[in-house]
């Protein structure tokens, strides 16, 4: 196993898929101590900065596209560490704002770890639909932690809400409603507990600014932290709600991911939440059935499915039977279904699945899902997904600004 020496004050950036073990010295990742002999695993398409607090030796392994580089100095800006310390002086709710590949999740994790070390418990709230860390893409959620973490994506979703697309843009109201519902549940369960809130990366339009202003109103954070500049409208909103806002510099090293890499990360996340799936046949009359756009009438649900399949056929050139059941069956034989969402009898989000059959006439549906419990509601989405997590097809034009309750 190869070894590398890292001088005190320098950083080893580990690019996944890879692992590293601290053999000598003292090091940490985003404020989380790296224990001697403990293995740090970095997943594909991700990176982790290992900061040497003393001269250190690390063993490492890596797979295809993985590796490491040693950077002189600390790649985490001093301003980030200073803010994390300041925010953790008292129990705080911190919103982290930034564009795609800005280092937003890295900063949110650093803040989370500081809050945990100071207050023994903190919540991570994931509102990023496309590059989600703890929940399936197209959903939002949270988890609570009592010890610092190297990698927030390795933790289990505690509760979540359905939105239905990989960006808020076609479902703005649905995203806001889901955030509002999640916030109510959090307030009831974790009143007064510190939280690090990883916002979505949609920042490049007036609509995005209005969306963030609404999130500030709902979340009522103590701090709104931006990587780079904060739009003046957002600053004004923060001032009106007595939210301290601050712009922090970007990190020294950010591994830019192209669209293919971001898509691959989503596919790995889908696959994670579809693992150990089984096909379940459920009478339609046993569940509340609706579409992601809130259509509950069976005729409109069927039209929604037909529109998705027709749009896919036109886009891909694949010949599908005009009979919905036969078209779904053909896709299912190729390992493809409609990404759908399940709720349990307590009305809590219970996971995702692939709808592979829907027959109103014979009163049954079939869904491939790892969820084994009772299904109270099934929400039919607007993305065709493979069992390996590949986004086969999506069309945001099929979506509306209808809310998702």
Image (tube, rainbow, N blue to C red):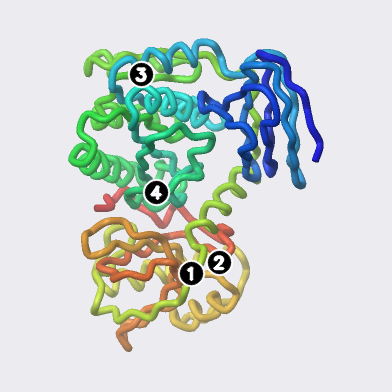
Residue at horizontal 20 percent and vertical 33 percent from the top? 191
- SS at badge 2: loop
Q: Quick one: label 3 or label 1, which is nearer the N terminus?
A: 3
Marks 3 and 1 sit apart, C-alpha to C-alpha, by 40 Å
Give the Cα separation between the discs numbered 4 and 3. 23 Å
The residue that label 2 is drawn on is 387
Q: Earlier in the sequence, mark 4 or mark 2?
A: 4
Residue 118 as seen in the image, left or right of residue 202: left
Q: Given contact means CB atoms under 8 Å apart, are the residues at marks 2 and 3 in contact?
A: no
Tell me how far mark 2 sits from mark 1, CA to CA: 9 Å
Name the one closer to the observer, 171 or 23: 23
Q: Residue 372 at what x, y percent from top left?
A: 37, 70
Tell me how far mark 4 sits from mark 1, CA to CA. Answer: 17 Å
Q: Nearer the viewer, mark 2 or mark 1?
A: 1
* First in sequence: mark 2 vs mark 1: 1
Q: Which residue is mark 4?
A: 157
Residue assigned mark 1? 277
Question: In the displayed image of the protein, which residue is found farthest to the bottom?
Answer: 362
Mark 2: few, some, or many residues within 10 Å (few <14, many ≥20)?
many
Q: Is residue 265 left or right of residue 353?
A: right
Left or right, 219 with respect to 164, comes to: left
Q: Which residue is mark 3?
A: 88
Q: Which sits in the foreground, 242 or 348? A: 348
Instruction: Name the spot of residue 143 as percent of width and height, x first.
Output: 37, 42
> What label sits on residue 66 in the rendered view?
none
């Amino acid at each position: 196993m190869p070894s590398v020496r890292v001088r005190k004050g320098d950083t080893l950036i580990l690019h996944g898929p890879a692992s590293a073990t601290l053999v000598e010295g003292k090091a940490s990742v985003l404020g989380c101590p790296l224990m001697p002999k403990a293995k740090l695993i970095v997943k594909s398409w991700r990176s982790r900065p290992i900061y040497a607090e003393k001269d250190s030796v690390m063993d490492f392994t890596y797979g295809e596209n993985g590796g490491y580089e040693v950077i002189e100095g600390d790649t985490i800006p001093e301003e980030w560490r200073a803010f994390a310390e300041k925010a953790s002086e008292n129990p705080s709710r911190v919103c982290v704002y930034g564009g795609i590949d800005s280092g937003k999740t890295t900063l949110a994790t650093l803040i989370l770890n500081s809050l945990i070390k100071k207050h023994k418990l903190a919540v991570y709230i994931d509102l990023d639909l496309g590059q989600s860390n703890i929940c399936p893409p197209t959903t939002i959620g949270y988890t609570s932690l009592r010890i610092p973490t190297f990698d927030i994506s390795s933790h289990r979703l505690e509760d979540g809400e359905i939105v239905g697309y990989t960006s808020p843009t076609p479902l703005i109201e649905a995203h806001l409603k889901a955030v509002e519902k999640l916030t109510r549940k959090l307030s009831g369960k974790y009143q007064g507990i510190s939280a690090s809130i990883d916002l979505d990366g949609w920042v490049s339009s007036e609509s995005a600014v209005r969306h963030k202003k609404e999130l500030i109103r709902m979340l009522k954070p103590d701090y709104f932290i931006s990587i780079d500049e904060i739009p003046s409208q957002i600053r004004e909103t923060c001032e009106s709600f007595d939210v301290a806002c601050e712009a922090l510099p970007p990190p020294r090293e950010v591994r830019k991911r192209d669209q293919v890499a971001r898509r691959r990360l989503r596919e790995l996340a889908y696959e994670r939440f579809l693992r150990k799936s089984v096909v379940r046949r459920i009478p339609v009359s046993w569940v509340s059935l609706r579409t992601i756009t809130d259509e509950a009438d069976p005729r409109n649900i069927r039209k929604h499915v037909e529109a998705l399949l027709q749009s896919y056929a036109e886009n891909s050139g694949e010949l599908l039977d005009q009979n919905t059941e036969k078209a779904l069956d053909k896709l299912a034989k190729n390992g493809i279904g409609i990404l759908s969402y399940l709720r349990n009898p307590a009305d809590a989000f219970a996971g995702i699945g692939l709808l592979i059959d829907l027959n109103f006439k014979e009163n049954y549906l079939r869904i491939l899902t790892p969820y084994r419990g009772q299904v109270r509601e099934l929400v039919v989405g607007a993305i065709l997904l493979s069992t390996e997590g590949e986004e086969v097809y999506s069309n945001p034009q099929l979506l509306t600004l209808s809310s998702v309750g």
